[in-house]
């Protein structure tokens, strides 16, 4: 028999915290489970004891959005400080600015183009014989031509995804702009920033409600579902269904941490496009908090590889094989009751933080509306297919 009004949430990251807070404020008793020993999921941040640097433990998370309500929401729990993500890239023993912009183009080709000249030049580099790009490589060749593709996209992508860019869909590259001005702000969103005291502090404040109880180092099992009126599940969809159709494909990340006395690279993120360099990038964490001053520095070399059974999944791959399996999981999950799958893992979709929060707010509000109507809640608000 289901517990009336009691809500179970799996995962104490952004999805679980936001849904939990909204339902707790509406009067529900909320129990949140997380298998890790900390809240905030992959957004987890912590102070390094020796240097005082705020560490993005699972890699950098930079908040950017055009959604004013989401921006106001996160700022209500933590002051967000101004931060612009200005990425650099090392390729062929030179350092360039990303995303590819007018300075990158002029430096790479040894030119002094004006914007209209650069646009004409890049259009001439593009492979116009590719009318309908299907793969990442085709999209890049059609978009920027062979030279820029090989310098900035080919090697990095091969290391990041563990396969040839000819095997990846063109849609992946559509997130990477080319600019014909000197704007080197990686994101174009209206609101951008970093939480002053880190994401874990922010999510801790979201979870700080008398109707919320968080159980860390605790795995939720399917048999517990009947203990709750409804469960919101932000763990992996295939994991919940015991990998019935085989594991879905994910990439995971390994970090090789090192310390430096001073400023190691002068920027937060340095990409490495050459295949001869085994890591994809180096992140220097004190530069993610430019309002702070630290003499010492903490850096991560970042390596991407296929996700194993005991690894932390980061990116859904979503190749043809994965989509076929995913369709089986979605059909199987649709037969479940009193559970809604949410977030990046629950819906097997790449989601930025602002989209995760938006979907979590919408999910909680829909649940309250359906509850008032005595109507059931869908298994997926956003189809993974």
Image: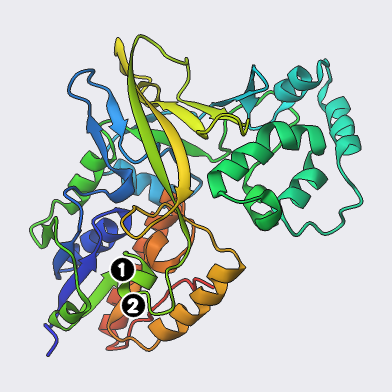
Circle on res. 184: none
Question: According to the image, label 1 marks what residue?
Answer: 364
Q: How is the image coloured?
A: rainbow
Q: Nearer the viewer, residue 190 or 380?
A: 380
In which quadrant will I find the C terminus? Answer: bottom right
Q: Of label 1 and label 2, which has the lower sequence position?
A: 2
Residue 292, x across and y down, in percent? 31, 18
Write the residue at 31% across / 53% down. Answer: 14
Write the residue at 75% across / 45% down. Answer: 140
Q: Residues within 10 Å of mark 2 (few under 14, many from 20)?
A: some
Circle on res. 241: 2
Write the residue at 74% across / 17% down. Answer: 107
Whole-angstrom CA distance, mark 1 to mark 2, is: 23 Å
Write the residue at 47% across / 47% down. Answer: 305
Q: Residues within 10 Å of mark 1 (few under 14, many from 20)?
A: many
Snapshot quadrant of residue 370: bottom left
């Amino acid at each position: 028999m289901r517990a009336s009004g009691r809500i179970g949430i799996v995962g104490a990251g952004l999805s679980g915290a936001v849904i939990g807070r909204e339902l707790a404020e509406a009067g529900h008793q909320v129990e949140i489970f997380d298998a890790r020993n900390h809240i905030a999921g992959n957004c987890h941040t912590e102070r390094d004891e020796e240097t005082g640097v705020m560490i993005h433990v699972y890699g950098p998370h930079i908040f950017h959005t055009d959604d004013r309500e989401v921006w106001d929401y996160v700022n209500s729990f933590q002051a967000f400080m101004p931060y612009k993500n200005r990425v650099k890239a090392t390729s062929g023993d030179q350092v360039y600015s990303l995303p590819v912009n007018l300075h990158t183009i002029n430096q790479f080709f040894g030119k002094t183009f004006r914007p209209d000249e650069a646009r004409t030049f890049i259009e001439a580099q593009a492979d116009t014989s590719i009318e309908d790009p299907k793969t990442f490589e085709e999209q890049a060749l059609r978009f920027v031509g062979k030279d820029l593709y090989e310098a900035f996209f080919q090697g990095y992508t091969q290391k990041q995804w563990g396969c040839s860019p000819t095997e990846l869909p063109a849609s992946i590259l559509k997130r990477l702009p080319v600019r014909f001005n000197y704007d080197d702000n990686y994101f174009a969103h209206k609101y951008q920033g970093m939480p002053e005291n880190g994401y874990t502090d922010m999510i801790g404040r979201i979870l700080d409600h008398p109707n919320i109880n968080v159980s860390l180092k605790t795995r939720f099992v399917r048999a517990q579902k009947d203990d709750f009126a409804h469960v919101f599940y932000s763990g992996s969809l295939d994991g919940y269904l015991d990998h019935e159709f085989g594991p879905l494909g994910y990439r995971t990340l390994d970090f090789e941490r090192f310390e430096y006395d001073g400023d190691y690279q002068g920027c937060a993120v340095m990409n490495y496009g050459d295949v001869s360099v085994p890591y994809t990038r180096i992140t220097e964490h004190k530069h993610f908090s430019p309002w702070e001053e630290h003499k010492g520095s903490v850096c991560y070399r970042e390596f991407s590889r296929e996700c194993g059974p005991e690894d932390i999944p980061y990116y859904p791959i979503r190749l043809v094989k994965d989509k076929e399996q995913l369709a089986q999981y979605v059909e199987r999950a649709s037969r479940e009751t009193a559970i809604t799958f949410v977030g990046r893992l629950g819906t097997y979709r790449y989601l930025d933080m602002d989209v995760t929060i938006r979907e979590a707010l919408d999910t909680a509000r829909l649940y309250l509306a359906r509850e008032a109507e005595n109507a059931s809640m869908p298994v997926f608000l956003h189809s993974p297919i």
